[in-house]
Amino acid sequence: MEIQLTQQDGLLAFDDASTSHYLTWNPMVFHAEFHRICQQIYQQMRPEPAYGQSALHKVGFDVIDQMVPADEARGLSDIYAHEAIEQEGSANTVITPSPKLKTDIINVINNYLAGTEALIESYLGCFFRVHHVDLMRSRPAEDLGHSYKWHRDFDPMSKIHILIYLTDCGPESPATEFMNLDDTRRCVDQGYIFPAQTKRIDNIGSLFEDGTAPIKTVRPELKAGDATIFTPSRILHRGVMFDEDYRDLLVLNILPSLNPWDAEIDHLGTERLFAPSDTLFFDPFTQFKPLIESADGIEVPIWAQHGYHFPLT
């Protein structure tokens, strides 16, 4: 069936009847198809690439220096301190923002995300959307949980995380550690492929025989207002916890779109950004992206296992 496009509230959109059949596919596959269609539309509108090959392309992560001014970042952290709800035994405290904090976060997005627009569009090859945001305070806990072992997010291969640090991240601060794309694929070849939470490991070297070239990992040291940008479904990563106080993050969940991110915010509003949302089990073809029924035992295609955006030809 031929894809039909329409205009809805000033945004480019799909005709529902021409895309509903995609939802019968494996979610990783239909998200990849959505990404491919977004690229085709984008190339018609912006045929010249906006940005060259970056570390995000080559290794799967990069650092953005002073994405947000340090004083603004620390101001958000001060608000986190008042709004965080203690969760005994949990390393990650999720913050439910007040109306004032929501306004401050929207101002940060509107004022500073444009500085990374060319990088993200070049990497994805299309426009993008802020799917939702997460507000998080990490601190030492007796049981750190599954996020502090090596893993990849079970989400579309196109997903991008931007972690904006609201606090300084020194040598012994809570942080996120990354493995590059090539080494992640080496681990895939050893059978470490989206392991169940109970089967995640701390020592990635245990997958390899003695004498094998070691896996190289990176744990960036950052100042408040710096950010890391990475591809959480494509590369292995883990949280790292030290005894030093806490880490405050504003997390932007980025996915492909038919429309520029700021046009979506203008037309669709901002309240949706603060609603808890799945980034795999939803319908990307409709404007408001409704959730779909999740399922266990989803097969991970070979191309996705190895961190490619699309099926290999």
Image (spheres, rainbow, N blue to C red):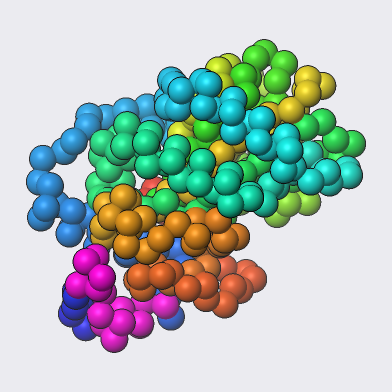
Q: Position of residue 54 (x, y in %)?
A: 32, 28
Q: In which quadrant of the rendered view does residue 78 lie?
A: top right
What range of the chain is rendered magenta? 7-23
Q: Is residue 282 visible?
A: yes
Picture residue at 41% right of the left edge, 70% below the top: 288
- Residue beneath the point at 38% across and 34% down: 112
Total numbered labels: 0
In the picture, measured across the screen, residue 164 lies left or right of residue 264, that is right
Pick whichever, 35 or 119, lies toward us.
119
- Residue 13 coordinates in the image, percent (x, y): 25, 71
Q: In front: 126, or 248?
A: 248
| Quarter occupied by residue 299 | bottom right
Residue 275 appears left or right of 147: left
Using the image as rendered, state which of residue 98 and residue 44 is in the foreground: 98
Q: On screen, 95 above or below 184?
A: below
Residue 283 image position (x, y, % from top left): 43, 72
Q: Is residue 128 above or below residue 276?
A: above
Residue 7 appears left or right of 252: left
Instruction: Determine if residue 233 is in view.
Output: no
Q: Residue at x 55, y 56 (%)?
A: 274
Residue shown at 36% from the left, 60% from the top? 32
Residue furthest to the bottom: 17
Please tell me in which quadrant of the rendered image residue 56 appears. top left
Q: Is residue 233 left or right of residue 10?
A: right
